[in-house]
Image: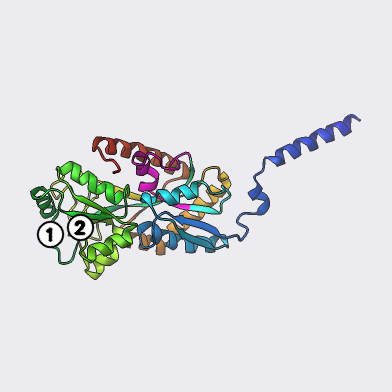
């Protein structure tokens, strides 16, 4: 009787412990069910380009399809809110950015998600500076030309961006704040439409990432006047920094990452981090990122989480100091 009681107790304990094992372990994630990768911006922008580049290889590594779903709007907030409500089962990923996961929380009073509490950080893809761009036939040859025109006739120089609250928008606002100028911000639903507006002459200038601007700089349809990084880019040695162009200490770096809904089991997050990190380290992707002007990320999941929290605090301070608000 005593032995039987001990066996029953052991079995009960084993059953209880097995009950705590996440369901994904039994289903051998991924099962072959497609994984949705939400890009909270229209096609053609930095987040979309990176998502498609990584998604194709990640799908092959996991043995399933990665379906890119563009959900643009409100500086990445619309798609991010959708992702935050998805089941935390490893079948939904989000291409998060400095906008959606650091800036917007200080701009939008009703964001629809918490950039920290609503997500599980997976990996920092990388960071890249932004460029002040004009079309090829623009009369502006330098950033100083732009600033002089903006000061001479305040509120007449138009500048496109990928949308309210994006890093492109914030870089423009910070430039205006630090130089005492006023631009007319013209938001578009993503970088693709914004740069087409620039090329078509609907706006005077724009600020965007090296990823978006790269092909247009190569084709000669746009010109770069300045870069937001602390140092000149190796790929664009003749383009001065904004600091060199008369705005001392100016530095802004955009970043891109991948997130999963909060509550996604840690083994799934760790597996995703490992697979994507391996993809980012391949010579092919390293060369591609370098050609796009991106510095690949090299942070652990925990380091990425800490980095994101610091970014939220940093931009909250900048937005408050510059009196930037949504109209």
At 38% from the left and 53% from the top, the residue drawn is: 73
Identify which residue, 189 or 208, lies in the foreground.
Answer: 189
Look at the numbered discs 2 and 1 and tell me whether their residues touch, using CB distance below 8 Å.
Answer: yes
Q: Position of residue 227 (x, y in %)?
A: 22, 53
**Residue 159: % across, % down:** 22, 54
Residue 55 in the image, given as x and y percentages of width and height: 47, 61
Decide whether residue 278 is among the magenta residues: no
Quadrant showing the N terminus: top right
Disc sitting over residue 140 in the figure:
1
Local SS, label 2: strand
Placement of 1 over or under 287, stated as above or below: above
Check if residue 110 falls in the magenta segment. Answer: yes
The label number, if any, that marks residue 205 in the structure image: 2
Q: CA distance from mark 2 to mark 1?
A: 9 Å
Position of the C terminus, as image quadrant, is: top left
Question: Which residues, given as a range, are shown in magenta?
Answer: 94-117
Q: Residues within 10 Å of mark 1 (few under 14, many from 20)?
A: many
Q: Is residue 236 left or right of residue 119?
A: left
Residue that protrudes farthest toward the top in the picture = 2
**Secondary structure of the residue carrying numbered label 1:** loop
């Amino acid at each position: 009787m005593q032995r039987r009681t001990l066996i029953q107790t052991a079995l009960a304990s084993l059953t209880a412990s097995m009950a705590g094992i996440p369901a994904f372990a039994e289903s051998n994630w991924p099962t072959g069910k497609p994984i949705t990768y939400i890009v909270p911006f229209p096609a053609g922008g930095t987040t979309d380009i990176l998502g498609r580049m990584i998604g194709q290889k990640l799908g092959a590594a996991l043995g399933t399809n990665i379906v890119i779903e563009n959900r643009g709007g409100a500086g990445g907030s619309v798609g991010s809110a959708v992702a935050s409500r998805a089941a935390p089962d490893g079948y939904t990923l989000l291409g998060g950015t400095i906008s959606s996961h650091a800036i917007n929380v200080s701009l939008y009073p009703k964001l629809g998600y918490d950039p920290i509490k609503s997500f599980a950080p997976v990996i920092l893809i990388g960071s890249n500076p932004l460029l002040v761009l004009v079309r090829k036939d623009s009369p502006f040859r330098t950033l100083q030309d732009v600033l002089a025109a903006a000061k001479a006739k305040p509120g007449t120089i138009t500048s496109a961006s990928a949308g309210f609250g994006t890093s492109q928008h914030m870089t423009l606002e910070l430039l205006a704040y630090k130089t005492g100028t006023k631009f007319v911000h013209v938001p578009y639903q993503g970088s693709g439409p914004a740069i087409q507006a620039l090329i078509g002459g609907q706006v005077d200038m724009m600020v965007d990432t090296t990823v978006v601007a790269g092909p247009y700089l190569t084709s000669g349809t746009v010109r770069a006047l300045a870069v937001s990084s602390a140092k000149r880019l190796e790929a664009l040695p003749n383009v001065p920094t904004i600091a060199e162009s008369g705005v001392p200490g100016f530095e802004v770096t955009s970043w891109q990452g991948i997130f999963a809904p909060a509550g996604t089991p840690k083994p799934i997050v760790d597996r995703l981090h490992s697979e994507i990190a391996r993809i980012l380290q391949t010579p092919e992707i390293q060369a591609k990122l370098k050609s796009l002007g991106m510095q690949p990320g090299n942070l652990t999941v925990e380091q990425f989480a800490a980095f994101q929290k610091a970014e939220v605090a940093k931009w909250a301070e900048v937005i408050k100091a510059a009196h930037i608000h949504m109209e």
